[in-house]
Structures are given as structure tokens and as C-alpha cells.
Image (cartoon, rainbow, N blue to C red):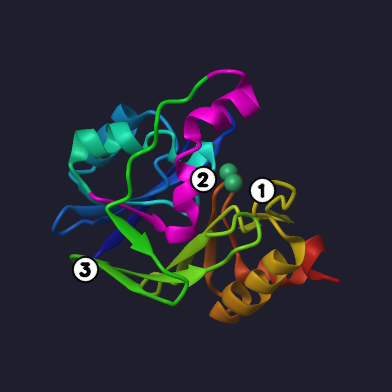
Amino acid sequence: MTIHIRMLTLGQIATNAYLIGDTETGDAVLIDPVDDAPLLYQAAADEGWTIRLILATHAHFDHVLASQPLKDLTGAPFAIHQLEESWLLTLPEQGMMFFGTHFPAAAKPDRLLMSEPETIEVGAIRLETLFTPGHAAGHISFYLPSERVVFSGDCLFAGSIGRTDLPGGDFNTLMSSIHDQLLPLGDDVSVMPGHGEPTTIGVERRSNPFLQL
Ligand SMILES: [Zn+2]
Ligand SMILES: [Zn+2]
């Protein structure tokens, strides 16, 4: 089994989407259908991969804008935490709030993730859910133990953390999520965030200004 990860940075505020592909079977998981469904679909096809599952870390527009068109293109089910479902329904209004334009409706989730840890398997790709609220009420990070990689969404960034001033945000909750869910994964674990460059748990534990308090 060989698993490859591709990062694609797309959309109006440069959000990272991640394709996780099993190079033997061609099965792939997409984390965060950020924008431009045809491009995401083609990026998978270029690798010889088929997107079997679409996951979202949370329902802010920049992470789910392509959820419906990508579901239409791939036929893959879409999963997100249950607490994000109501926010997901506000996608057209989020467009008005942030950009003064209506966004298209988001995909209806086919599977709702819970706060308790769950294992998500697509072929040989096995992801564990980590409930990491604080930036958004139902924010999930996805851990890929075989590669020692965590997809941290807008919870933890290289040198920063997610904003907590949007509805459902809470600073203390976010800090607890980072300390209780992400840091214990281990210093060698790579962090693939929703914005900016990849980092590691160790680098962030030692140098992220928000983790030195
Ligand atoms: Zn966000
Ligand atoms: Zn974001």
C-alpha cells in the first residue's frame, strides 16, 4: 500500500484542499471541497485516482464551496460533523456576508460525523476523526496514522491558529482542542492545515506563539 497526498490551494482566500490517494487501487479521499470542482476532479484523474469520499473539516464557505458540484462530478458521498449542518445551509448567505454575492447551495451531507472518534475507511486509506471545535462548533481534524499526518483544517496553522470571532467560535475551546487532540499525536506528525504551508506538531509546539502561553 502506498499512499500519496496532494495539496491544492484554491479559491478566493487561498484554502488548501487535500487529495489522499492509494496508488495501488486508485481510491482517493478529498478533504475540503474548497472551490473549482472540475479542477479537483481533474487533479485526481491526473494521478489515476477516483474520489470515493468527500470530507469537510467545517462548513465555512471557503472549505465547502465546491461540495455540490464535486458530488455531482464524482458521485462520492459527502461527510461533515453534525454541528456544521446548519451552518452548511447558510452557504448562500455566507456569500452575502463575506463578498456581497450569493454562493450556490452546499451539498447535503450523506453522512454526519459525531464528536466521538470515528474511523473512516476508503480502501486502504484509514482516517481517524478528531473533534477539534473552537474555530467552528463542529470542526473536525482528520488523522492519517499510516503516514503520521493530520489534516488540521482551520484549527492549527503554521505559526498561528484559527480565528475565533465567527459564530460558533471560542478561543478557550480552540486551545483545548489543540492541546488535547492535536499535540498528543506526537512531535513527528506532519500538520496539513486549511491555509498556508504544512508544518509539524513539534515545530508548532516549540515555536507557535499561541502555544507558548
Ligand atoms: Zn474556517
Ligand atoms: Zn478557512
Residue 30, compared with residue 81, is above or below; it is: above
Q: Which of marks 3 and 1 is nearer the N terminus?
A: 3
Q: Nearer the viewer, residue 202 or 184?
A: 184
Residue type at mark 1 is Pro
Please give the range of residues in magenta. Answer: 77-101
Residue at image point 55% right, 26% down:
95
Per the rendering, the mark at residue 167 is: 1
> Is residue 100 part of the magenta span, yes or no?
yes
Residue 75 is situated, as x and y percent measured from the top left of the image, at: 18, 42
Residue 160 is situated, as x and y percent measured from the top left of the image, at: 73, 55
* Beta carbon of the mark 3 residue lies under 8 A of ligand 2: no
Residue 188, compared with residue 43, is above or below; it is: below
Q: Mark 2 points at which residue?
A: 87
| Circle 2 residues within 10 Å: few <14, some 14–19, many ≥20 | many
- Asked whether the residues under the numbered discs 3 and 2 touch, taking CB atoms below 8 Å apart as contact, a structural biologist would say no
Q: What element carries label 1?
A: loop
Task: Choose mark 3 or mark 2, whichever is in front.
Answer: 2
Residue 145, compared with residue 29, is above or below; it is: below
Q: Quadrant of the N terminus?
A: bottom left
Per the rendering, the mark at residue 124 is: 3
Residue 100 is situated, as x and y percent measured from the top left of the image, at: 61, 18
The CA span between labels 3 and 2 is 31 Å
Q: Which of marks 2 and 1 is nearer the N terminus?
A: 2
Q: Nearer the viewer, residue 63 or 46?
A: 63
Residue at image point 21% right, 33% down:
73
